[in-house]
Amino acid sequence: MAGARRWKGWPAGTQRPGYAGPMQTDEILNRAAGRLASAESVAILTGAGVSAESGVPTFRGHGGLWEGRRPEQLASPEAFARSPEDVWRFYLWRRDLLAGLRPNPGHRILARWQDRFPGFRLITQNVDGLHQAAGSREVLELHGSLWRVRCTGCGVETETREVLPGPIPTCQDCGAALRPAVVWFGEVLPEPVLRAALEAARDCDLFLCIGTSSLVHPAAGLAWEARQSGAVLIEINLEATPLTRSAHIALQGPAGEILPDLDRRIP
Ligand code: BJW
Ligand code: ZN
């Protein structure tokens, strides 16, 4: 599993008060499962961490996607304007990597939950398509998809899994440069998708935030919206994030292990 990050334990002295800790107690897991069981509408926001156990590198932290290069250095319109070859090299490499990767048990549990919970909504910041590969339907992709390209000339957007010819793939219709149909820094998120995600956050009675550093907005704001609207907030992450202190329940560990564990405990 190239690039996969394994949970190696919580660094000494960094455990937060009220935080579950690396050894989840049965009590806290049962509490989370009980909250899920009694929820009428569940909204879930996922980030790169949910795909880490499939072998997809995350963006930030050790072993991150852009070690030595900040995300903004490649995921921005400025970077693309400056050096489309460079940006495309990076995205072509990611498409190639992803083509050989499969959903993990975390993705599969979330796909099962769409039929288990009424009013279920799955919102993702990920562009890898692994939720859909696991069987999730109507996924709200806040940051677009690595499997779609958009023409910078005529604007046409196409879904393609084919190996794209580098160094800069071009539009078959008008010859202009294509770009990945993802949302870069400083770009607006697709309006209907963001609106649906905000509605899901405001209307749910349980919001589960999985594997995201909760640093990138507006996605990170969804959990706060949910909490302010009265939802129970649960977080699953290897580490503490800016959200952790505000979560009602924070479960610490790999999503691919915690989600199946929670599933088994739901009465
Ligand atoms: C595990 C695990 C395991 C590991 N199990 N856990 C408000 C305040 C401040 C700034 C802004 C603001 N509003 C807007 C901004 C500006 C900016 C922003 O947020 N900047 C901040 C960084 C400061 N936002 C934008 O520009 C957005 N657009 C926008 O707001 O438009 C309106 C506007 C326009 C102009 C001016 C002002 C407003 C667009 C954001 C687009 C983000 N795009 C990217 C790239 C997508 C394409 C691609 O993939 O290449 O999206 S950046 C990157 O970050 C990617 C991700 O979706 C996103 C979030 O990352 P994520 O998923 O959280 O990953 P990591 O790596 O950060 O974290 C992984 C986590 O998993 C860690 O916590 C690990 O511990 C954990 N983990 N393994 C469980 N096994
Ligand atoms: Zn075109």
Image (cartoon, grey):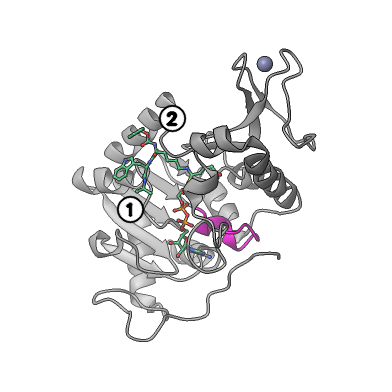
> Which residue does the image show at 35% across and 63% down from the upper left?
32
Task: Say which amino acid is labelled 2.
Answer: Val
From the viewer's perspective, tell me whether residue 21 is left or right of residue 169. left
Q: Which mark is residue 193?
A: 2
- Is 245 drawn above or below residue 77 in the view shown? below
Q: Are marks 2 and 1 in contact (CB under 8 Å)?
A: no
Closer to the chain start, of discs 2 and 1, is 1
In the depicted structure, whether residue 22 falls above or below residue 136 = below
Badge number at residue 38: 1
Q: Considering the image in quadrants, where does the C terminus appear?
A: bottom left
Answer with left or right where residue 175 lies relative to residue 87: right
The circle on residue 159 is none
- Where residue 261 sits in the image (x, y, percent)? 50, 68
Q: Which residues are magenta?
A: 48-57
Q: Residue at x 27, y 60 (%)?
A: 247
For this view, does 234 lie left or right of residue 182? left
Q: Secondary structure at mark 2?
A: helix
Q: Quadrant of the N terminus?
A: bottom right
Q: Nearer the viewer, residue 253 or 90?
A: 90
